[in-house]
Image: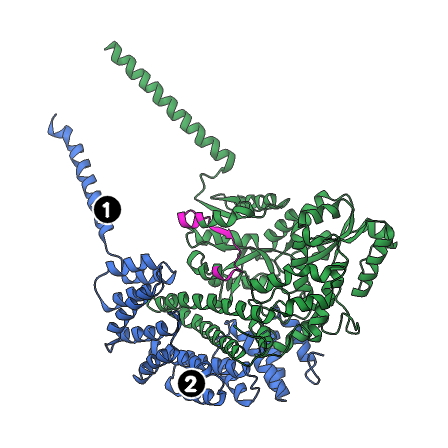
Chain colours: A blue, B green
């Protein structure tokens, strides 16, 4: 066979080899951290763990692996202990990864074990807040600490002390979303204990002021402000918020009830 | 040479025949299904609605959509309800799940898996539906085109603060009745207007013909209708549990009050509820607790019973089988002056905010999410939803879609009071969990027995009810905490992605915080109720 006859075959062979090589390269490309976080965000813990392991070594990848460990079945005391060990190592630093790790050390102690330890969780949150870094993890720690103090710390049943321990947390952040969440949990806890007073109304109004127009939580807050204002005798505020609700959420399932409450502002409701 | 020539000719003929047949098949398929060429993509959807006319309605809508989009093929998978769950799990695991899936999201553990399997559709819901161009819904955000604003416990998941599905139809619970028979008994075909008239009608029915039943009863129908009826009849009292002032009492609120000693089975509203249940049962087929819904429906269709409590989803089937005219009405609630049964309702009452039905979710595995959403938009446009409603004999889910006269009595009445939470509303009969429901259901015979009644039923229930409420609530807390754990890491992961995901993470954290706060508040109440010295409690 002449060279000319063989040439197409050699080109074809070369092409196939190149395609094979490209494909192999593609297959061996390690997943990126972004891919791994995306996998974790939809709850594929084992896959996410493999992806974090396959990425280049970094503190962020180690954090990702530790977080997958929290939920990857089977969750056992030893798997949680391993996650705790990994998180504790990462928390020793001073960067944002260390803050995330400390936050999750708190979460691990608070919601993961069979016997949660809210006091130990609170200590982690307090440690984080003491850094005065107003980052994602410190902000979350503030709200989680507020929830613990409003319910189980120092001890259930001492409501005034619990409330007094939470109000000062508002001063620890300038972030509007965190301020919103703190006002929200304060208002909700006070309402749950039927503390229908001006202070509760203040927290509700503050939360409402920082709630986006499109947010579905806003419908609840409008009703809560209106009803509490009505209970406190502030008919103007009640009317304004009921009307705003009806204007913004005409198809909401509670629209009829709100309309009736508005119509009975001068008298008892329900009639 | 000759032999070689023959071989070449044979091979040539064979090749020509092959090419001709390929051309013929391709041409035939193109002209038969799509004159514009092969479909660019295929959208598949799955559901378990095998009632009469449903598959045909889905086919109709799919064909109409394909006529508008010749490059798209829409395929329907109608899977029997008995195997649907297993079928869906298999498809999800195999990565072969259809683009759009009918799914039941009311189960807490299902809700926990939801973001893993389905995509949030909030961003599309905020845009207008292009298929409504030229109608009165033109330019209106898609979510606001639905009769419930796109929000019910199946379509909007509060925990994730996102829309996940759209409903294609709407349903309600009604008392269906035999118009011809009612005319024969009372001389008119209008249903009773109040609870007392309804009870009197029962007496007339029994006097009219020996063996004739007022209400074709069955265990299933009773269990569906009774909780709604009792909740509606007790709305004014249930609202007293709304401590967070939302006009949306939750199960935690109401049953937390019970554990705090604010009410028990002997409280007047509860005793009234049990009297209503007893009166309702007395109108039904003797021994109805042993009957299933098919027996009840057959008795009604054979003319052995005047009426049948049922969901409107069964109307197409009944309509096809009945040899008489079918009417429907809402069971009237006892009036405020009714000393025996009334005093706790808030009138007028809403249908219960059931919202839309037949929710279709967008699978995460969908290869064509934009196209799947486009199909959903068509089905829920004014034109698409009208066609679907007409063909399926189901109520539409879209605002302003013309309702056929035969479906008018089924129209949801949302212009009334509703005071329970959409996600976690309390049900006096179904309670906060499975053990409570079982306690009520397994002892119903005591309530309905000739020698039983409200007092006997109360005595049986009150022996265990507080312990059972506590244990159900603890289970609920356990499940919700499990969800919190999963969402915690998911939201953390989002905060390591782009700005959009970070904003979403912050947004969802707010509802996580509230959920968590309520779990602790409930747990605190449970612990307080379990302290020594609280009578009758040991959990």
Q: Secondary structure at mark 1?
A: helix
Quarter of the C terminus of chain A within the rendering: bottom right
- The disc at residue A23 is 1
Residue placed furthest toward the top? B2
**Can residue B438 be seen from the camera position used here?**
yes
From the top left corner, tell me how far across and down residue B52 is, in percent. Answer: 64, 44
Decide which of B26, B392 is in the foreground and name it: B392
Against B344, residue A14 (above or below) is above
The residue range painted magenta reads: B90-109
Residue B442, how many percent across, how many down? 63, 59
Which is nearer the eye, B341 or A253?
A: B341
Q: Which mark is residue A154?
A: 2
Q: Chain of mark 2?
A: A
Residue A4 sits in quarter: top left
What residue is rendered at 48% in x and 67% in y? B159
Callout in the foreground (1, 2): 2
Instruction: Say whether residue B181 is magenta.
Output: no
């Amino acid at each position: 066979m002449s060279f000319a006859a063989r040439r197409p075959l050699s080109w074809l062979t070369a092409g196939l080899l190149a395609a094979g090589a490209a494909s192999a390269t593609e297959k061996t490309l390690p997943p990126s951290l972004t891919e791994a976080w995306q996998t974790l965000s939809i709850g594929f813990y084992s896959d996410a763990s493999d992806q974090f392991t396959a990425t280049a070594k970094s503190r962020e990848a180690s954090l990702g692996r530790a977080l997958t460990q929290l939920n990857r079945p089977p969750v056992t005391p030893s798997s949680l202990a391993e996650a705790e060990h990994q998180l504790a190592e990462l928390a020793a630093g001073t960067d944002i990864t260390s803050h995330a790790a400390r936050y999750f050390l708190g979460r691990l102690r608070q919601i993961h074990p069979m016997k949660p330890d809210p006091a130990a969780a609170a200590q982690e949150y307090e440690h984080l807040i003491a850094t005065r870094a107003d980052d994602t993890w410190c902000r979350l720690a503030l709200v989680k600490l507020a929830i613990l103090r409003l319910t189980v710390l120092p001890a259930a049943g001492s409501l005034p002390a619990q409330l007094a321990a939470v109000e000062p947390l508002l001063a620890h952040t300038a972030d509007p979303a965190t301020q919103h969440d703190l006002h929200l949990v304060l208002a909700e806890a006070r309402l749950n204990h039927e503390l229908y007073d001006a202070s509760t109304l203040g927290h509700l109004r503050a939360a409402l002021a920082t709630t986006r127009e499109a947010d579905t939580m806003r419908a609840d807050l409008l009703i809560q402000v209106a009803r509490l204002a009505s209970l406190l005798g502030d008919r103007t505020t009640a009317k304004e918020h009921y009307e705003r609700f009806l204007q913004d959420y005409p198809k909401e399932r509670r629209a009829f009830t709100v309309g009736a409450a508005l119509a009975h502002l001068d008298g008892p409701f329900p009639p | 040479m000759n032999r070689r020539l023959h071989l070449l000719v044979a091979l040539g003929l064979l090749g020509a025949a092959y090419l001709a047949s390929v051309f013929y098949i391709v041409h035939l398929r193109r002209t038969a299904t799509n004159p514009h060429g092969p479909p660019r993509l295929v959208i598949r959807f799955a559901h378990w609605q095998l009632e009469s006319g449903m598959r045909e309605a889905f086919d109709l809508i799919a064909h109409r959509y394909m006529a508008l989009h010749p490059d798209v093929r829409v395929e329907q998978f109608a899977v029997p309800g008995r195997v649907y769950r297993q079928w869906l799990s298999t498809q999800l695991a195999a990565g072969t799940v259809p683009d759009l899936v009918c799914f039941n999201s009311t189960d807490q553990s299902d809700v926990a898996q939801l973001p893993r399997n389905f995509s949030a559709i909030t961003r599309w819901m905020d845009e207008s539906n292009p298929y409504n161009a030229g109608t009165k819904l033109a330019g209106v955000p898609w979510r606001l085109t639905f009769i419930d604003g796109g929000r019910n416990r199946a379509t909007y998941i509060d925990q994730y603060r996102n829309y996940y599905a759209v409903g294609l139809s709407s349903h309600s619970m009604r008392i269906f009745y035999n118009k011809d028979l009612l005319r024969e008994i009372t001389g008119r075909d209008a249903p009773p207007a109040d609870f007392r008239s309804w009870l009197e009608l029962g007496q007339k029915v029994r006097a009219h013909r020996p063996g004739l039943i007022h209400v074709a009863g069955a265990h299933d129908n009773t269990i569906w209708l009774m909780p709604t009826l009792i909740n509606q009849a007790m709305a004014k009292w249930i609202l007293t549990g709304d401590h967070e002032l939302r006009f949306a009492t939750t199960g935690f609120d109401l049953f937390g009050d019970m554990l705090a000693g604010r009410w028990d089975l002997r409280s007047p509203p509860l005793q009234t509820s049990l009297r209503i249940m007893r009166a309702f049962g007395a109108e039904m087929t003797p021994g109805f607790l042993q009957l299933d819904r098919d027996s009840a429906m057959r008795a009604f269709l054979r003319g052995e019973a005047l009426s049948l409590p049922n969901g409107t989803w069964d109307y197409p089937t009944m309509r096809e089988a009945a040899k008489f005219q079918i009417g429907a009405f809402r069971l009237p609630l006892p009036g405020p002056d009714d000393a025996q049964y009334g005093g706790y309702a808030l009138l007028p009452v809403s249908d219960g905010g059931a919202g839309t039905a037949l929710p279709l979710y967008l699978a995460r595995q969908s290869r064509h999410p934009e196209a799947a959403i486009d199909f959903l938009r068509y089905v829920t446009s004014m034109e698409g939803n009208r066609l679907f409603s007409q063909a399926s004999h189901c109520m539409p889910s879209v605002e302003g879609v013309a309702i056929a006269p035969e479906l008018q009595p089924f129209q949801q009445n949302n212009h009334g009071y509703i005071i329970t939470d959409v996600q976690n509303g309390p049900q006096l009969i179904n309670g906060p969990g499975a053990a409570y429901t079982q306690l009520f259901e397994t002892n119903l015979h005591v309530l309905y027995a000739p020698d039983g009644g409200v007092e006997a039923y109360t005595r049986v229930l009150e022996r265990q009810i507080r312990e059972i409420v506590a244990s159900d609530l603890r289970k609920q807390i356990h499940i919700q905490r499990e969800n919190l754990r999963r969402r915690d890491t998911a939201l953390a992961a989002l905060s390591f992605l782009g700005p959009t995901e970070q904003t979403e993470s912050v947004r969802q954290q707010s509802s996580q915080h509230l959920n968590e706060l309520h779990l602790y508040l409930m747990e605190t109440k449970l612990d307080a109720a379990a302290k020594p010295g609280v009578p009758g409690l040991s959990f």
